[in-house]
Image: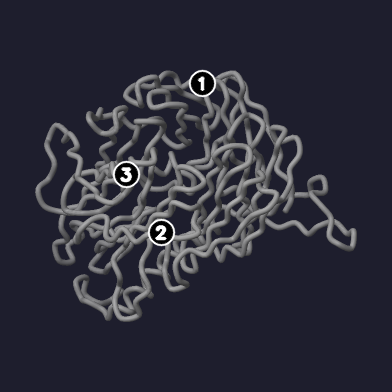
Amino acid sequence: MDADFDTTASSSHVRRAMSLIAVSLFVIAVSGILYLHPALPAFGQSASGAPAAQSSYRVGAVDFVDPLHGWVVALLAAGDLAVLHTADGGATWTRQLAVAGDVHPNYMKFFDERVGVFALLGVRPVLYATEDGGTTWAQRPALSDGTSVISWSFVDSDHGWMLAHGEDSEAVTPVRLYRTQDGGRSWDDLGLPVAPPAQAYQVHFSYLTTGWLSISGPEPAAYKSIDFGRTWKPVALPPPAAGWPSKGQYFVGVQPTVGSGALASIVFFPPVKGRTGVGGSIRAFPPLTVRAFDGGRPYIYLYTTVLDRLAAGGRTGAPAPNETILSTGDDGASWTAIGQPPAGGAIGYSDATHWWWVGAGSWSKSADGGATWSGPIETSVIEPLPGLLQVLDRRNAWLAGTSGQRPVLQGTADGGQHWRTVSLPPV
């Protein structure tokens, strides 16, 4: 960290360093909120009949397909993961999958009561698929062991995409986009989704044909595909009143909501001016990781954006400077500038226009894609973990958080007026 900001290290060292930074940031985030799970009714027994050992964990993802059928990812203290399932609205739980996660982030998506996928980000990419509600899982290695996946996206059990760094010991390989049409059994290389110096960090498909990227680059443009990810075209975004700055680096993250809806976060960093502390260089997302100078030395800053409150795996912390938030209900043909919802909490949506915000003891709604918000109204709800609010429809929703030292879920069936608490079992 004592080297000049613009000094170029060997490519292999750069790649290794960035990988270590990414893993270290995730470990720090996880370690900061891990806690010891108290004794709860026995979750299961070992082969000898003794009670199963329980581990510290927190909730890493929540995915319900209706008010009764849902899955939870438990992030264990050792860095491993377990998938828990309920078919009765949380009255009983079954552990369905245990994975050596090595502190890697995860991706989970269920399409109905029986069909879903689960995958880890990072090296040695492996996809797990189920067609019986998680009772059994098929393990499907993706690409070679040397690749490193940074984002997954599936629209059904067959069609999915992933962004990954290829295997190259001599150079830092740019991120490439891959597509499967057979549930991960084979993958097609679609090449670079964006041309350097732009860099892609996440891919999200809302339809079979329509996808969005989260990128950094010199222009304030969102990137969209309408041909299954083969080509990506920039989509102009309306500037703020003062206009977009002309020189610097932009982060443009787009997260689809439902149907033709999407939320965009645009953050600008001016060019670095020596060691003055002015400017920054975007290095990773999520979280939004920026390298700058602080007191004459290089320093890594981690920022949160509105997307952290929308997607699983989000974080809380210092808000990104001068963030512009836009929403669309017509696949990017038009955009509306929206204000920041209340601080903290999590955001969910039942369709392109109806959004919820939930914080500790309060709840608010929007009927215009986040442009205006009601309330907030007081209600008996806990503080949800960032990104772990799932709104199923205008009456039913689930969220994950903690009650004292216990990981819990809360659900509502009356549009957020009342919430019931569901305790999660030891793992």
* Residue positioned 19% across, 71% down in the render: 6
Three-letter code for the amino acid on which mark 2 is drawn: Ile
- According to the image, label 1 marks what residue? 394
Residue 65's place in the image compared with 132, above or below, is above
Of all residues, the one furthest to the left in this rendering is 246
- According to the image, label 3 marks what residue? 212
| Earlier residue among tags 2 and 3 | 2
Of all residues, the one furthest to the right in this rendering is 49
* Residue positioned 42% across, 60% down in the render: 187
* Residue positioned 79% across, 49% down in the render: 43
| x and y percentages locating residue 382 in the rendered image | 59, 33
Which mark is on residue 150?
2
Three-letter code for the amino acid on which mark 1 is drawn: Arg
Disc number lying in front (2 or 3): 3
Instruction: Kindly state the secondary structure of the residue where label 3 is placed.
Output: strand
| x and y percentages locating residue 270 in the rendered image | 16, 53
| Earlier residue among tags 1 and 2 | 2
Q: Cβ–Cβ below 8 Å for labels 3 and 1? A: no
**Foreground pick, 73 / 410:** 73
Query: Residue 55 is drawn in which quadrant?
Result: bottom right
Residue 402's place in the image compared with 166, above or below, is above
Disc number lying in front (3 or 1): 3
Label 2 CA crowd tier, 10 Å (few <14, some 14–19, many 20+) = many
Label 3 CA crowd tier, 10 Å (few <14, some 14–19, many 20+) = many
| Earlier residue among tags 3 and 1 | 3
| x and y percentages locating residue 183 in the rendered image | 50, 52
Marks 2/3: CA–CA distance: 15 Å
Query: Which colour assignment does the render follow?
Result: one colour
Marks 1/2: CA–CA distance: 32 Å
Query: Residue 365 is drawn in which quadrant?
Result: top left
**Foreground pick, 333 / 74:** 333
Instruction: Kindly state the secondary structure of the residue where label 2 is placed.
Output: strand
